[in-house]
């Protein structure tokens, strides 16, 4: 099934781009040299044409190629708020976690996972298991995939409870000195601070001193801007 879709991706290869991508992402796999906006357009068309069952099959096959753009396309195929039924989608996305080895692929899959979590928040019970994984990228995914709970301006009581639960996971990560884990903590608290400053401040009061300095600075970016009256510098 995948071959015709891979041919579509390959038809947009830009000369010389693959070399730069390989140097930037560093993970050892094939890079074709296709821009991300092209993958957005292609997968948007594919989603419209394929059934959920066919999308799951195609995503699985693309993922197994271990080609960078194919893995991004696999994630994009499954990134949609309304998918019914979505149990097969959820199971496939979870099955990819052990394969994570770079932030770009992990983040694209986490965007798909976010949609499935907000559709069925009880799946957080399964995500909590990720927080004790020996695999750093799986632990990191528990925070990146739950970012929607940082963004609600008027959360329901059950969503506040979920917010506190995830902050508890983040607190448990603080002693982990891995850069990507520290960055994920900072990302979660930073985004939360724009919608729930009291909780972000409380987290930093309790744990900020134990974060790496770059993470502490990033987590408090918007809180510091509010206190000084200066606009925050947007992260890259």
Image: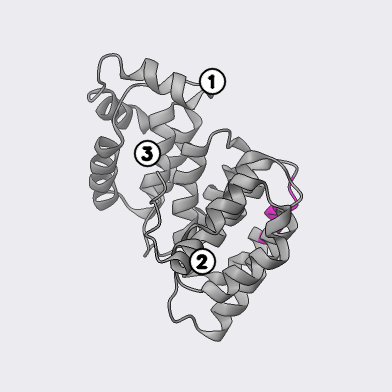
Check whether the beta carbons of the residues at disc 2 and disc 3 lie within 8 A of each other: no
Q: Which residue is mark 1?
A: 28
| Left or right placement of residue 66 versus residue 124 in this view | left
Where 196 sits versus 72, above or below? Answer: below
Can residue 132 be found in the magenta stretch? yes
Q: Which residues are magenta?
A: 128-133
Instruction: Tell me, for residue 73, which label it has, or none.
Output: 3
Q: Which residue is mark 2?
A: 192
The CA span between labels 2 and 1 is 34 Å
Q: Residue at x 58, y 50 (%)?
A: 184
Q: Position of residue 125 (x, y in %)?
A: 66, 66
Can residue 151 be found in the magenta stretch? no
- Say which label, 3 or 1, has the lower sequence index: 1
What count of labels does the image hold? 3
**Mark 2 Cα-neighbour bin, 10 Å: few <14, some 14–19, many ≥20:** many
Please identify the quarter of the rendering in which residue 67 is found: top left
- The residue nearer to you, when weighing 233 against 123, is 233
Q: Residue at x 25, y 20 (%)?
A: 14
In this rendering, the label closer to the viewer, 2 or 1: 2
Please identify the quarter of the rendering in which residue 95 is found: top right
């Amino acid at each position: 099934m995948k071959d015709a879709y891979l041919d579509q991706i390959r038809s947009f290869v830009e000369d010389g781009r693959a070399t730069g991508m390989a140097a930037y992402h560093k993970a050892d796999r094939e890079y074709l040299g296709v821009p991300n906006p092209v993958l957005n357009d292609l997968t948007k068309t594919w989603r419209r044409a394929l059934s959920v069952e066919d999308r799951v099959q195609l995503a699985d096959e693309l993922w197994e190629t271990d080609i960078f753009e194919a893995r991004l396309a696999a994630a994009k195929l499954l990134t949609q708020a309304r998918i019914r039924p979505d149990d097969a989608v959820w199971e496939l996305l979870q099955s990819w976690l052990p394969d994570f080895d770079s932030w770009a692929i992990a983040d694209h899959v986490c965007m798909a996972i976010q949609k499935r979590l907000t559709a069925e928040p009880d799946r957080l019970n399964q995500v909590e298991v990720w927080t004790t994984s020996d695999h750093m990228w799986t632990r990191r995914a528990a925070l990146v995939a739950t970012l929607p709970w940082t963004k609600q301006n008027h959360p329901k009581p059950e969503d506040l409870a979920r917010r506190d639960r995830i902050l508890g996971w983040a607190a448990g990560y603080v002693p982990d000195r891995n850069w990507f884990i520290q960055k994920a903590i900072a990302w979660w608290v930073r985004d939360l601070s724009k919608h729930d400053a009291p909780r972000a401040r409380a987290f930093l009061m309790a744990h900020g001193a134990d974060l790496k300095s770059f993470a502490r600075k990033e987590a408090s970016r918007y809180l510091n801007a509010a206190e000084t009256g200066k606009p925050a510098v947007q992260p890259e």
